[in-house]
Image (cartoon, grey):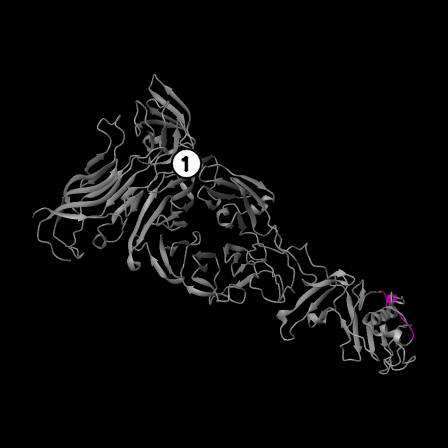
Amino acid sequence: MATKPYPVASIIQGISQQAIHHRRDSQCEDQENCVNSPVDGVRDRPGSILTKFLASADYSDAFFYFIDRSADEKYVVIVLDGDLKVFNVLTGVEATVTFSAAKTYLDAPTGKVADSFAAVSIEDTTLIGNKTIAPAMNSGDVAPDAVNECLVYIRAGNYQMEYTLGIDYGGTKRRWSYRTATQASTPPDDDNAITTDQIAASFYRALTGNTASGSSGGIIGGTYNGDPGWAAGGPDARKNSIVTTPGYTLTSLGFTVQLNGNVLRIARGDANPFTLDVADGNGGNNMTGIQGAVQAFADLPNNCFDGVIVKVRGNKTDVDDDYYVKFEGSGRSGSWVECPKPGLKLSLDAATMPHQLLNTGLNTFTWSRPTWSKRISGDGDKTSPEPSFVGKLLKDLTYDNARFGILTAASQVWSKTSNAFTFFADTAKTKLATAPVDLDIAYKKPSILERFIQAGELSMVWAPGVQFRIDSTDQGFKEDTVSAKPAKNYEFSHKAAPVAVADSLYFATEQLNFAMIRDLLIRQERILGAVPITAHVPRLIPNGVRHLVGGDSLSMLFAGSLGLPNVLFNYAWLFGENEERVQSAWNKWTFPSSSNIVWVAVSETKIFLGVQRPGGFSLEYMDLAFTSRDPGESDYTTQLDMRCYGGASPGSGWVGVTSITYNAGTNRTTFVMPFAPSEAVADPSKLVVVTRTATADVTRGTIFKVLSVSGSTVTVQGNLTGLNFFVGWRVITRQELSQLVVKDDNGNVLLPTRLDIKELRVAYANTAYFRIEVVVPGGRTYKSEYQGRHPEKSSGGIQQGTGFLVQGVSNPADGARITLINDSPFPSAWTGLLWLYDTTDPALKG
């Protein structure tokens, strides 16, 4: 048969583990360290820049939190067992942290530190919660106990009116009765005899035996004799008078009596009980007795005694509207203000509550305990109760609807609006729209809440097997309008929090030995459903997913697993018209096998890494911006991991080698790395040393052979003194092509008896180096190499070209294993393929 061409216009769909006949032409068998770009094709991923190496540091069990403050200021907070550090991830500078509070809140069980904390940022404040410490009330801050007291309030004075005050104490009832004269019999100069102040003063003298300022008339206290007509007789009815049996004073029985205008305060300094009862001839409208409570706020006198506390019951049928008030002031000035019930704990114990890390300036922070607002109202039961998180271990921290939130296993509690440190209502008299919200969340089967997730304006609480949507009515986000309704029923990985990116919420689910990643689509706050984006790579990501991060600017997701701790699984997507997913590409980003990637974050076009290594801990970042170039250069970016510099510094945030020494006798240069590249001891070629700028004698991009590695000392062939160079781990970009399957114009697979590949042409663009390797049955390998360097190599510098690289195959499609490789530190991009094939018999439609 004649040779036929089979073009593949794009190869950016990543790995597929499906049967070969079900794969797209644009998918591959395997892919490593690639970026699948709809614009550039398959290009090499950027290498990482080392910004900090902490020798001997072990952060493998640390808790990490990313503070993305601005484009020029980004930090990682690292919580250790009993300590905390902050690093600027752009410059590697360790921030100064002033500890105004003890570090004991940072204590956590050994081996479980990473899972023992939660954090959330509110402007320049980052709140960090310890999941092993249950928030508590402060037992040392308690409202004073109720005083054994009562009030007598003379509300009005009338002529020919009888006022009666009774005290039942120690089994004996004692009463005092005061009768005003008739108006006709009262001399004109005695009109003040019926003022409320005068009546109260008269009782004061009767109760104490003392004359209050402004009082007049003879008053006698007595013991009630049980006669219903007890106060009917007495002195001349034309005068104000008290009629009793012979006398007692309350002060002689250990009572304290105080007078303030028309109000009397009767109290004991002990807990011995007594009962007050009062009566008047006007149905109780002229004289009120208050012992602990009133029905309505209007029943309280305008003037009182400083510190007196009274309960206001409110609606008789509604116990939820009970509240307490306290009089603040003295004499005729003062007012009633809300207060908490006597004996209630007033404040949260700050030692058990989330602590704050305040960013006070560039690379400066303060660790302290927030001042949590006190309980200032309520009975502690129906009104202003303790937040439901008290006594419960926290699960997550949140900030939404301008409220700080604490999630526990069974509830979500939000603070007062725009006041993160207030979890008690300002008033018990009414439900304000700004008041804290305390929401119990339950399902028909037991479910332990684990994560609070925000995706745009949508808020969700996730528990294993059920996800709740947090909603509020059009009346706003407040206590009586917020609800949590079951929305979906998915299982998810406990270590990796679901991550919202653009209109999607990605989450991991463990399945046997491998994990599934799903995309929960959200459109206009509607939860549509979860699409398994690993359906075509079901055996790619091992169980133990602990990282899920993504970036809308990159249209990428990154997953990290304990099963392969040195690998990041990269997912690239692209949506077309009508929500069609036109790209869904997975590949692997691999790092030296001894690497343990313990932290990943994405911000704009940068990916930040925290990596635990045999000799210490490193902070690194990669920049995926299309315009990214080596500092001061305009041609390309050198692709090396943990890239360090030698010679002049490229700028802030770079880590350099030291002790550069040249031996002219051996023509060798030694230098000391900031870390010990232990994996290069047995294979020095894993390290690459390459010039980053040109001199009169050496071009940019000249590679110096690494001869040996001993500890952190590296020896290379040649003279590096006076040169600016990079050194770092070799990054190998690789794509193993899927077995060729020929399809017709309608996408139907053609199944000839035999399909032979004659030749492969790989389209490339802006490429400095790559090669094609073909392994045929028997193990023989054939290679074709493209090298963009000037033919003189050592003097011409790196040239980037565009074209086709041709490789002969001449083997059956099912027998040839073809891989595209770039193991140089220079750029490459593969944009398409052209297969030349023939068959031994006519194609049959499949």
Q: Vertical placement of 314 versus 423: above or below?
A: below
Is 239 left, or right, of 348 in this rendering? Answer: right
Query: Which residue is drawn at the image coordinates 31% and 59% (left, top)?
Result: 579
Query: Which residue is drawn at the image coordinates 42% and 46% (left, top)?
Result: 601
Q: Position of residue 487 (x, y in %)?
A: 42, 64
Residue occupying the far left of the picture: 1
Q: Which residue is mark 1?
A: 50
Residue 257 in magenta? Answer: no
Q: Compare residues 465 and 78 and report the one nearer the observer.
A: 78
The magenta segment: 246-254
Q: Amino acid at mark 1?
A: Leu
Main SS type for the magenta part? loop
Q: Compare residues 442 and 233 and report the one nearer the observer.
A: 233
Q: Position of residue 787 (x, y in %)?
A: 23, 33
Residue 252 in magenta? Answer: yes
Residue 463 seen anywhere in this rendered image of the structure: no
Residue 566 seen anywhere in this rendered image of the structure: yes
Is 788 left, or right, of 841 in this rendering? Answer: right
Within-10-Å neighbours for mark 1: few <14, some 14–19, many 20+: many
Q: Position of residue 821 (x, y in %)?
A: 26, 39
